[in-house]
Image (spheres, helix red, strand yellow):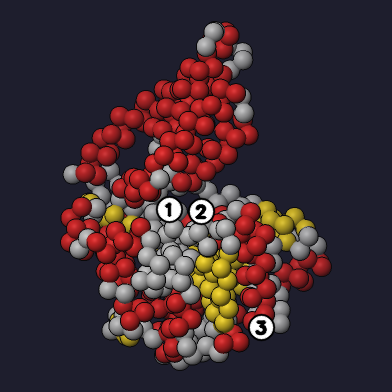
Amino acid sequence: MLYQIHEWQRSFLGPLSYFAQANARMLNDHASPLSQWPGVQRMAAGFELIHRLGKDYEKPEFGIHSALAHEHEIAVIERVALDKPFCQLKRFKRFSDDPATIEKMKVDPVVLVVAPLSGHHATLLRDTVRTLLREHKVYITDWVDARMVPAAAGSFGLDDYVAYIEEFIRHIGARELHVISVCQPTVPVLAAVSLMAARGEATPLSLTMMGGPIDPRRSPTGVNNLATTQPLSWFKNNVVQTVPPNYPGHGREVYPGFLQHAGFIAMNPSRHLSSHWDYYQNLLRGDQEDAASHRKFYDEYNAVLDMPAMFYLDTIATVFQQFLLPRGLWDVAGERVNPAAITRSALLTIEGELDDISGLGQTQAAHDLCSGIPPKRRAHKVIEGAGHYGIFSGRRWRETVYPQVRDFIRKFDRATK
C-alpha cells in the first residue's frame, strides 16, 4: 500500500513540478516583460527549487562519448555485451584512427567494474569508468531497476548475483581480466571467484576491492548497526513493498528506491537542507556554475532504483547479520565459499580513512580470508582524508587512488607485463 501511496503523491507532484519549471523559465527569459518585474528573481528561484524538489528523477545516462586515452581524445561507444533480466553487462568500446594509439590500446588491460546494487544506478561510477578508459578496456555491470523486470522473469537473490558475476567473468575471459568491485559487490565477487577457483576454473588476473563489507564486524558503522539491531522480519515487514500495476514488474516484491532515498537523506538531513538553500541563493546571485554543480550532483543522487526483495533480505541476513563469509559458513547454491582456494588472482584492497559506510578494516579482512594468495601478490591501501565516495569518484580518486589501481593491474597483467 505504501508504494501505491507514493505513486499517488508522484502523480500529484509531477504536474506541480512542471508548472514550477515553466514559470521559472518564463521569469528567467530576458525576452519576457515579466522578467523586469521587481522581485522576479526570488520568484524564479523559488519556482526552480520547487521544480527540483518535486520532479521525478529518471536513470541518468553514462554520457561517455569520448575519452582521453594515451594522450589522444578518442571516440567511445557504449555497447551491451550481455543482456540478462536483472543486469546488462556493458562495454565501453574505444575507437581511434591513429595507428600508434591503436597499437597501445591493443595491449591495454581488460577491466570489469562491478557496480553496487544498493539503491543508485551504475552511472554513479561514471567518473570511475571515464578515468579507467585512459588505459584500460572497460566493462561494467549495469543493474536493472527491479520494478522494470516482469514477474515472469522469476526471483533474484544473492546466489543469483554471484552466478551473474561468474557468467560475466567467463563471458569476458578470466585469463585476461581484472575485476574491480566497489562497495557492496566486494562480497559476491569474492564468493564468485572463490567458487570458480575451488572448481579448478580460471580466475581473474587481479581483484581490486574498494570500500566493501567483507567483514562488517570490524569498525561497524551506522549502516551496520541498523542491520544488527533489527531482526530480519522487521526489514521484511517494514521496507519490502509490492510493485504497483503501472510498471512491468507488477506484483514483484522489492525494496523501493524511494524508501532507500529517504534513508540516504535521513543519514544527514541538515547537509541536504543546507545544499538546497545554497542552491536557492546561487540562483538569486546568478551563480550558474555552482547551480549547475548542484543540479549535476542531485540528478545522480536522487535517481534510485528498486532492489529485488529477495536479494536485499539475503544480503541483510548473510552479510550484515550472520557474517557467513568471514566465518567460513557461506554456501551458495550448495557450494561452500572458500576464499582460501584463490591462488592465481592478485588482491588489492582499498579503504577510505573517513568511510562512514564500510568502516576501516572491513575490506582489509579479505586478506585474512584469501590465505592462498602469496603475500607478494597482495596489497592494501588506506586513502587519507577520503570518505566512501572519494575512493572511486572525484579528484582524490583520479589523482590518488587511480594511479595505484592502474599500477597494480599493470604489475599483474599478462599483456602489459
**Residue 16 horizontal side relative to residue 292, left or right:** left
Q: Could you tell me if the residues under marks 1 and 2 are in contact, i.e. CB atoms within 8 Å?
A: yes
Percent of width and height locating residue 164 = 41, 71
Residue at figure coordinates x 36%, y 79% from the top left: 326
Residue 176: numbered disc: none
Percent of width and height locating residue 219 = 40, 67
Q: Quick check: 327 above or below 214?
A: below
Percent of width and height locating residue 10 = 31, 35
| Spatial separation of the CA atoms under disc 3 and disc 1 | 34 Å
Other residues around mark 3 within 10 Å, as few (<14) / some (14–19) / many (≥20): some
Q: Quick check: 230 above or below 34?
A: below
Q: Quadrant of the C terminus?
A: bottom right
**Residue 89 horizontal side relative to residue 135, left or right:** left
Residue at figure coordinates x 30%, y 29% from the top left: 12
Instruction: Please tell me how many numbered marks the rendered image carries.
Output: 3
Earlier-in-chain disc, 3 versus 2? 2
| Spatial separation of the CA atoms under disc 1 and disc 2 | 8 Å
Percent of width and height locating residue 316 = 29, 65
Q: Which residue is mark 3?
A: 414
Q: Is residue 404 visible?
A: yes
Q: Which residue is mark 2?
A: 123
Amino acid carrying label 2: it is Thr
Q: Which residue is mark 1?
A: 120
* SS for callout 2: helix
Q: Quick check: 182 above or below 334?
A: above
